[in-house]
Amino acid sequence: MSKYDYLIVGSGLFGSVFAHEANKAGKKCLVIDKRNNIAGNIYTENIDDINVHKYGAHIFHTSNKEVWKYINQFAEFNRYTNSPVAVYKGELYNMPFNMNTFNKLWGVVTPEEAKKKIYEEIKEAGIKEPKNLEEQAISLVGKTIYEKLVKGYTEKQWGMKCSELPSFIIKRLPVRFIYDNNYFNDTYQGIPIGGYTKIIEKMLEGIEVKLNCDFFDNRQQLQNTANKIVFTGPIDKFYNYKFGELEYRSLRFETEELEIENYQGNAVVNYTEYEIPYTRIIEHKHFEFGKQSKTIITREYPDSWNKEKEAYYPINNDKNDELYKKYEEYSKKDKNIIFGGRLGQYKYYDMDKTILEALKSFKQEKDFE
């Protein structure tokens, strides 16, 4: 007899939701994580009364009422609205592209004036069949917006020229002909008061957790302790790169504590010039309307990925998606493994989609019983 019903590899959102549901259903779970903290990439660390998003900014947003109700079991959310600002050569622009942005770019005041300006630029470019990301972006928003607010940021993020990136990466660009700086269109939005780590702590109450425990360091023994494995790491690594390596982008963070009250006046400021190596600066206190006498900022640098670095973003181009399908098909033969999350399912998930996927996975488990 195995000691546990489920060995859950990774204490991020997918693993923790699955563990919570399984525990509630009377299943015995062991959650392991190679880091020295729970919560995966949504981990927030309290430093001098400021909840620092250690692995990049996370703003919870969803239009799914059930998901919103579910996450509110574990935390109270504030009224934070994501309204990032973009900096290009010392000029500030509102994101996503809206009437405030267009007024700053061209001095236009009405939606009709803004539409006319954008359509003139699209017509002038004359791109009928975009062959790459650059052409796709210009065909959607024109040259001015592309060059000032898309080009440099995208090239930093992907580590490639826009003219070398496939057009499908930008299927659409959010253009709003209203004076609204809210980045998301979702019905529900906010930041958990007290940080995300408290959510995961509540989810994992009554569940055995082992930190500083790398699955691959002691794989055989760990596998033998449970009837099933829920794996939220890279699927290709789990199968020892049997069909080849999937590609990812990584991130690097530089965090600094400053003896001033307010550094940039906004939680998220994007830097769209290619010459500035980081994509954004996060000022953490503004996520929770902090009044502390000091502040903490994090510069976020996109980074190339190798096996020694954390994988943050799957690169979902045709080549990688085809390779992932091979792993996905192969995994279906093994009824004792469940893959989840961005790395396990090789898909960029927002937090609400991660919760939905975890709930769906556990429901399927119950249905099979």
Image (cartoon, rainbow, N blue to C red):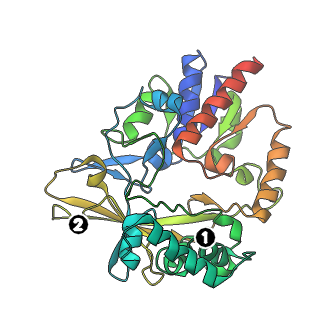
Q: Is 342 rendered above or below residue 274?
A: above
Q: Name the image quarter holding residue 263.
A: bottom left
The residue nearer to you, when weighing 198 against 360, is: 360
Q: Position of residue 331 (x, y in %)?
A: 81, 42
Position of 158 compared to 181: left or right? Answer: right
Q: Is 239 rendered above or below residue 68?
A: below
Q: Amino acid at mark 1?
A: Leu
Q: Quadrant of the C terminus?
A: top right
Mark 2 vs 1: CB contact within 8 A: no
The residue nearer to you, when weighing 20 against 115, is: 115
Q: Position of residue 35 (x, y in %)?
A: 49, 48
Identity of the residue furthest to the left in this view: 293
Q: Position of residue 339 (x, y in %)?
A: 70, 40
Local secondary structure at mark 1: helix
Would you call the spot at circle 2 few (<14 residues within 10 Å), some (14-19), or many (20 or more)?
some
The residue nearer to you, when weighing 192 against 17, is: 192
Q: Amino acid at mark 2?
A: Tyr
The residue nearer to you, when weighing 112 against 289, is: 112
Instruction: State which mark lies toward you, 2 or 1.
Output: 1
Would you call the spot at circle 1 few (<14 residues within 10 Å), some (14-19), or many (20 or more)?
many
Marks 2 and 1, how far apart at CA:
34 Å
Q: State the mark number for residue 140.
A: 1
Q: Residue at x 63, y 79 (%)?
A: 123
Q: Residue at x 60, y 59 (%)?
A: 313
Q: Position of residue 271 (x, y in %)?
A: 41, 73
Q: Quadrant of the N terminus?
A: top right
Residue 120 visible in the shown view: yes
Q: State the mark number for residue 214.
A: none
Q: State the mark number for residue 263.
A: 2
Q: Name the image quarter holding residue 169.
A: bottom right
**Dot 2 or dot 1, earlier in sequence:** 1
